[in-house]
Amino acid sequence: MSSIAPAHSPAASALAAPSTVVHKFGGTSVADAERYRHVADLLLARPESLQVSVVSAMKGVTDALIELAHLAAQGDAGWQEAWHALRARHRGAAVALLGEQVGDTVDWIDARFDQLAEVLAALAVIGELPREVLDRVQGLGEVFSAQLLGTHLRALGEDCAVLDARDVLVVGHGELGVDVDWDASAGRLAAWRLQHPQLRVVATGFVARDRQDRVTTLGRNGSDYSGAIFAALFNADELHIWTDVDGVLSADPRLVPEAVQLHALSYDEACELAYFGAKVVHPQTMSPAIRLGLPIFIRNTFHPGHPGTRISAERSPRGPVKGLTLSADLALLNLEGTGLIGVPGTAERVFAALRQAQVSVVMISQGSSEHSICCVVRAGEAARGRDAVVQAFSHELAAGQVQRVQVSEGVSVLAAVGDGMAGQPGVAARLFESLGRAQVNILAIAQGSSERNISVAVASADATRALRAAHAGFWLSPQTFAVGVIGPGNVGAALLDQLLAARQQLLAKANVDLRLRALASRSRMRLEADGLHEDWRQALQDAGQASDLDQFTEHLLAAHLPHAVVIDCSGSAEVAERYEGWLAAGIHVVTPNKQAGAGPLARYQRIRAAAAASGARFRYEATVGAGLPVITTLRDLVDTGDEVLAIEGIFSGTLAWLFNRFDGSQTFSELVAQARSMGYTEPDPRDDLSGVDVARKLVILAREAGHALSLDQVQVESLVPALLREGSVDDFMARLGASDDALLARLHDARERGAVLRYVARLGPDGASVGLQELPADHAFANLRLTDNVVQFRTRRYCDNPLVVQGPGAGPEVTAAGVFADLLRVAAGEGARL
Ligand code: ADP
Ligand code: ASP
Ligand code: MG
């Protein structure tokens, strides 16, 4: 039944418009008068000769009717108010839509609502809600809706018939859901057509009659199915399902905002997606379409120019996975027992018991050891299912052959769907890898033998994160990282600027989305839902929120993004205290802050242990040598089995500059003042001159090389005179001159021996020290550029000729670049294609 309909010649058919098209408009497309008008315009612009429009109730009306029926049956007097409100909504829509031509329509509506009120009053009396009454009530929204659209089309001068599906559609309710009595329905439709030969028909969705002639429905969201049934009954060439999204997307856009539109799907793929919860199309829609081979288009009423998604018999093998779905509100039912091993028929007994208890099984998984059988069932049916299985296995439970029958609540099933998965190795691996990286624990796994679907059960608390991680893992959306930055000082500010500047490019080129979701200074913090993209300075200034790292963390995790990273540019010990907790929670930590790396050994070890346990990464390249690859180099040496014998170098750009310039032509204190004014020193130059900073870097490197070194084990020569260690910076600067002579004397002594003075850090067999040293004038460290850092590794492999990393090792820009590089390494470690 494609466009090659008998009426067309094959040659013309490719260009000719399809002759019969059935359109289905969901509740989202007919929410109010304005939308009905829009739908009518859309219909009038279409070329087909016979046009059938199946409509849902106005958005929210079915829910309201169901609620109304329950209220009445519970004897809640509130039903009357709700009834009034619903009538008012329909009257209002009619008046707004039809204006002066509203005529009988309000009377028509009132009459239907009066009948409804009688039914509700009766429910209030009997105090219960029989199934068939509920069916009658909940389907009324479609009856009103079809009337509204049909009347509007007529008011526009169109010859249009309104078809109440309760007059023609006959269905039965079988075990596999609703089945259509095609012969009876076709017969009734033919009779109806004799009376209503119009070329435009507006029909009710959702409602039908059962074989006993009672009013019934096709189940929630059943109007899609109605559309397909009418497409078959009218022998349509195409079925168009109009909704509020551009078609079937790769995942539910409410959970995965980056979901992409799918141009085409096979019936099989659409079935799997629908069955596993993609709300956009009802699972049963496919059966009439498949039977006739007619294509279904899922389209956006709000965007009628968009071609939407074409669902047909054609398979397009593109991408192993087309889409992902999530079904919530499930539970895991597990039967476990050593006595099950090798016993035939156990699975059958489990499922027979569940079937008898009318518990439907969403997913089944059995380990090959047969030690346990587990299945996923709906949460509401779980207790019933457990009781049924316990009863079926009561004998084995008593005899100890079955150890337990357990239910775990709060389970969701994530399904990956695509024809292209069949016969393609590695798809499951990719899924599990993505979930593993996002710290999602998998409770059970199932793959259909069609290989069109892999399903995993996960805790509902992890479900959204799992969905997003898998979506990114199959390159359906970017690898998204929730980034939180703490401490927008010099380095932090440079990093934020670099990050925001590079964001778009990373997104476009590498499909990595680094979303700055949280930013905290010492006093204020800014938490953003979607991420801060522009002026972070202003945003932070406008932030009314006081800094609170608990909230900061909570917010970072709350987005359910697959990955979260904290970048600590604060230099604070308090923040470093948080690393362990963050890493344990799976949040990566990237930092130029030396507090953790050089702080108490026990804390450092706890941090490393937390990272090792969770798989989250702790990266701190920029703590030594700013952006220079010092730690990465060292780590590579160690990881490849080399042994570090000694580490030596100049780790402070400030001290390097001071001693490179110190030739006696200026006093040392003058040089310090000059360095300070050029921004080469810390705000308090004593932080540089004391040597502690250098000692910290040495500790970090020593630990990286496998030595359990602590700061107090490093011998530190401070260049700050003992008397000046306390007091204000200004005071210190004013009095530093007092030690000029002593330093000058050391310089002269060194010169006499043909040597120079350098502030050097050393780690070797005889311990760790940092301090001023005399080096031969031809020594490598004596001939560096002004502020260069140098680190020299002497190892078993690099024994005679040490490995040297050298270059500019200070300044906010290069330090921030080092931090950024760490961040990208973390992203790459999570599978980003960088
Ligand atoms: P209608 O009222 O038109 O029948 P529904 O609310 O039943 O609309 O279905 C459309 C909604 O389905 C979309 O707005 C979207 O939020 C949701 N949805 C869930 N999964 C998907 C998916 N994979 N693709 C598209 N939409 C989806
Ligand atoms: N109105 C019905 C429902 O909300 C049917 C449909 O819209 O598909 O379930
Ligand atoms: Mg729907």
Image (cartoon, rainbow, N blue to C red):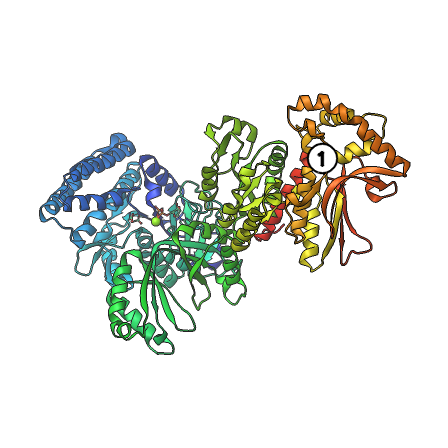
Viewer-side residue, 597 vs 630: 597
Q: Position of residue 337 (x, y in %)?
A: 35, 72
- For the residue pair 678 and 263, the one nearer the viewer reads as 678
Please tell me which residue lies in front, 674 or 80: 674
Work out whether residue 509 can be spotted: no
- Horizontal arrangement in the rendering, residue 453 relative to residue 765 (left or right): left
Q: Residue at x 72, y 44 (%)?
A: 769
Above or below residue 206? Residue 148 is above
**Where residue 517 sits: x, y (%)?**
51, 38
| Left or right placement of residue 128 versus residue 548 in this view | left
Give the SS element for disc 1.
Answer: loop
- What count of labels does the image hold? 1
Which quadrant of the view contains residue 425?
bottom right
- Tell me if residue 584 comes above or below residue 442 in the rendering: above
Q: Quarter of the image containing the N terminus?
A: bottom left
User: Residue at the location (90% across, 36% down)?
Assistant: 752
Amino acid type, residue under disc 1 in the picture: Ser
Q: Position of residue 483 (x, y in %)?
A: 54, 41
List the residue tagged with mark 1.
718
- Residue 444 appears in view: yes
Q: Does residue 350 appear to the left or right of 687 in the view shown?
A: left
Is the CB of mark 1 within 8 Å of ligand 1? no
492 sits to left or right of 437: right
